[in-house]
Image: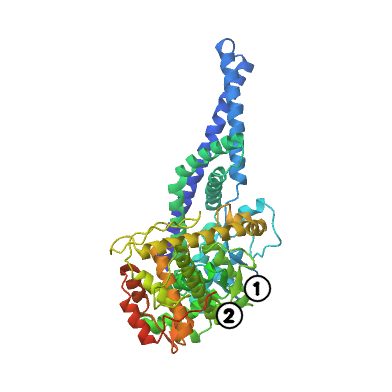
Amino acid sequence: MSGTVVGEEAGALSARSRALAVLRVRSRALALVLLPAAVAVVLLVGEVTGRIGGGLWDVARWAVASVAVVVLLAGAAVAAVIARARPAVSPTVPLTLTAAPDLYRLVEDLAERMDVPAPSAIALTPDCDSWLEDRTHRAHGPRRGPRPTIRDGAPVLVIGSPFLWWMRVAELRAVLAPVVAGTGPSAHPDIAAARRFVRGLDAAVGLAARPGPGPVRRLAYGAVGGVARVLLRSCRGHAAEMERGVAAAASERAQAVDYGLRIVAQEQVGLAYAGWDRLLTRVALPAWRMGRWPSRLDAGVVSALTELSRRDRLAEGFASRLGERPACDLLEEPGAVDEAASLLAARLFHGGPAAIGPDWSPVDWQHYPEEVVDRKWRTEAARLHRVLDAMGVRPSAGVPAGPTLARVMEHLAGGSWAAAPGPTANGPVKVPPVPEAPGTDGPGAALAAGISADVAREEAARERSAVPYRAADRAGDDVDLWGTDPLPLVPLQPPRTARELLADHVTAMVCCAAVDTAGAAPGMDWLDGPALLINGERRADLGARVLSLVEDGDPEPLRSWLATAGVRPEKPVRLV
């Protein structure tokens, strides 16, 4: 125990010394602003007392006084901007005391046990992380309704929403202990003042980067931003060391709280992160791209991680934890909280609007295969044939007309994949004549370019139609949460290449043919997203066959797969 106390004191001492170093930067800046005024006062006093006067001293006195006035006004303006600038806060889902009384009680018990101030409020973030966030600067602006508080002035505890659904109550308590312990050093006046100063500088730099119209305004904000950047560079290293000291002190203070369980709980943090990432990129993203958002993402984490534990030997035994009380039981209405966190995740990672609209509606997990997977396949299959029609591709003798898989395979088998032109939003891509020689720009490249252009046009049209809706939607947002940055703030994946788009569309066409001619069904895999079910079993061996056709122009692997699955490529499929 004595070692823990010594370690905590060392971390706190380091944090305080670094906080004083940050405040010294502020003091030096203030001294530089006051220096011309001090010199002017000395010269004026010298004149009054008769010790300094006449000749060049009068000129110097007026010159220094003029400089002092200008510097004081400029310093006051910079200080006002830094003091009034409102740093952006993390977008979160607030939890009131009435919405989560048991969770507030757990956090208060932790704080009391570690003898630190309790957080002022609790909020959820749609990510696998937890931290303390000081939001006292928001008091300078208008408040939208009452804010739940445990103790005024303490930071807000932000908890990763997937933790509440996957972790058990005891595990969540162990994970939150070192986070809550951070309120102790945060209450020190020097550390609090240093943090406010650094946040103000950072907010002033951001404000100066978007000054608005007018050359005078741009010049003024440019000067303020320059001063703020210099000050920020001067104290950045001290601020970083201060935060390390705060973290070390908080970690040492939390050693006595569920230490053994905390080691096990940290394993759950890594597992939750892996399942959350797969759920967002493989399952949620296809729905978001279609204007649908899964409304129970956090509940889906449990299913995804349970599936992972079934597949991965390293995760054996984790599913047995599900018999213990989940942390989401600490909420009064877990479903409503999950829906709010799911909508926020869609905004952060994809850029969707903040409310339900005609092109932005929720979808339940039980309806996901029918409303997302099947619709996605048929939309992409329709686009594939629309591009083929625009290219003037006609089936040869013996191949039925209409939207058939045989038409696609025949076209792609005429050449091999090579580099395709990038997507454009300005209009159709002009397709070059299709060469016969392999290894050159063949049918695959031309078709991919057409699909890329069509996708780009649709996305551009969607953005144009969403501008008025999003502007009205953002008008009700707290500017602190989003700033002026365009959404999404944290995109999950880079834009898909032409090659990837072509492979996705051919796969969708194969799946449509399987559903319409072989009795297959759309399904969902919790870790891999949309899935094709044949005789109730997921077929995961389709991707390599499609790539052989798309990249090499070789239809035989896919043709063999279709024959085994009983899919008839010559039959027309139903499109959207």
Which SS class for mark 1? loop
Mark 1, Cα crowd under 10 Å, few <14 / some 14-19 / many 20+, is some
Residue 349 visible in the picture = yes
Residue type at mark 1: give it. Ala
Residue 413 image position (x, y, % from top left): 34, 71
Q: Which residue is mark 2?
A: 329
Residue 358 is left or right of residue 157, and the answer is right
Q: Which residue is mark 1?
A: 99
Residue 15 image position (x, y, % from top left): 46, 53
Position of residue 347 relative to residue 30, above or below, is below
State the residue lying farthest toward the bottom. 535
Which SS class for mark 2? helix
The mark that comes first in sequence, 1 or 2, is 1
The residue sitting at 51% across, 75% down in the picture is 378
The residue sitting at 62% across, 41% down in the picture is 80
Q: Which of the 4 image quadrants contains residue 267?
A: bottom left
Q: Which of the 4 image quadrants contains residue 327?
A: bottom right
Mark 2, Cα crowd under 10 Å, few <14 / some 14-19 / many 20+, is some
Q: How is the image coloured?
A: rainbow
Residue type at mark 2: give it. Asp
Nearest to the observer: residue 230 or residue 462: 462
Nearest to the observer: residue 565 or residue 447: 447
Nearest to the observer: residue 188 or residue 326: 326
Residue 292 image position (x, y, % from top left): 57, 71
